[in-house]
Structure formats: structure tokens, C-alpha cells
Image (cartoon, grey):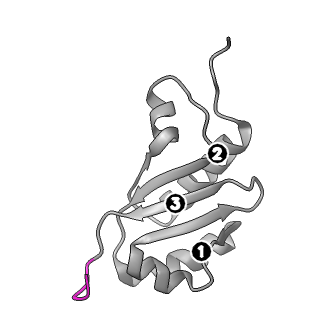
Amino acid sequence: MSEPTLSSSILDALEALVKWLEDEQVPNAIIGAVGVCLTAKPRFTTDIDAVIWIDRDRWEALMNSAVDRGFSLRESDALAFATRARVLLLTHESSGVTFTCHSAHCHSSEN
């Protein structure tokens, strides 16, 4: 039985995510199965989870830049959802890979 590998669509989407977050100067870490695959034996996965460190007042601009970079928002009112849940749900349009970006902190009097 051969070792599982990350699919080219996951790798393309991962590269796009990391480039976008670096360009936006958003500290981040890849977590979940893809994070494990980057440091250990790959395993099957179809999505990417990340943690991002961003203040709440930057959510809207980050979402706008995501759309400009080929990602779509998975919630109809993504800003309200992200503010409430501290999670940004995206799809990488060219690959169809979904992302869950968890906010590690959110500076606000409404935390």
C-alpha cells in the first residue's frame, strides 16, 4: 500500500492561502490534517484549517481581499458570522478546496 500524499488541489489551495495571508501580513499557522501532513506522514484530507491572528476591525478588509484573490465566502453574512464565531469560512474557487480560518484573538470591547 502506498503512502498517502496531499493532492495537487490541496497543495495549490494551501499555497494560495499562505501567499494571501502573508501578503495581508496576517500571522497564521496551518493546523488540522494538513498541518500534520506538513510535518509527519500525509493522510487523506479534503479541507484546510488554519489559525489566524487578526483584530476584529480587520475582518472586513481581509474578506474583501480574499474575494479579490480568488476565494469565496461560505456564509451569506460572512462578517457577522466571523465576528460572532471568530471563524472565517472560505472556498478556494479554482480548486474547490474549503478553508476554515479560526481567529486566535480578537481585540475588542465586545469579545
1 or 3: mark nearer the eye: 3
Q: Nearer the viewer, residue 57 or 42?
A: 42
Amino acid carrying mark 2 in the image: Thr
Provide the secondary structure element on which disc 1 rests.
helix
The location of residue 96, given as percent across then percent down, is: 74, 56
Residue at image point 48% right, 80% down: 81
Amino acid carrying mark 3 in the image: Thr
The location of residue 61, given as percent across then percent down, is: 51, 81
Residue at image point 67% right, 11% down: 1
The location of residue 60, given as percent across then percent down, is: 50, 83
Residue 15 located within the stretch drawn in magenta: no
Q: Which residue is mark 2?
A: 46
Q: Quadrant of residue 45?
A: top right
The location of residue 3, given as percent across then percent down, is: 62, 17
Contact flag, marks 2 and 1 (Cβ < 8 Å): no
Provide the secondary structure element on which disc 2 rests.
loop
Span shown in magenta: 107-111
Q: Along the polypeptide, which appears first: circle 2 or circle 1?
A: 2
Residue 100 circle label: 3
**Magenta span dominant secondary structure:** loop
Q: Which residue is mark 1?
A: 65
Q: Quadrant of residue 75?
A: bottom right
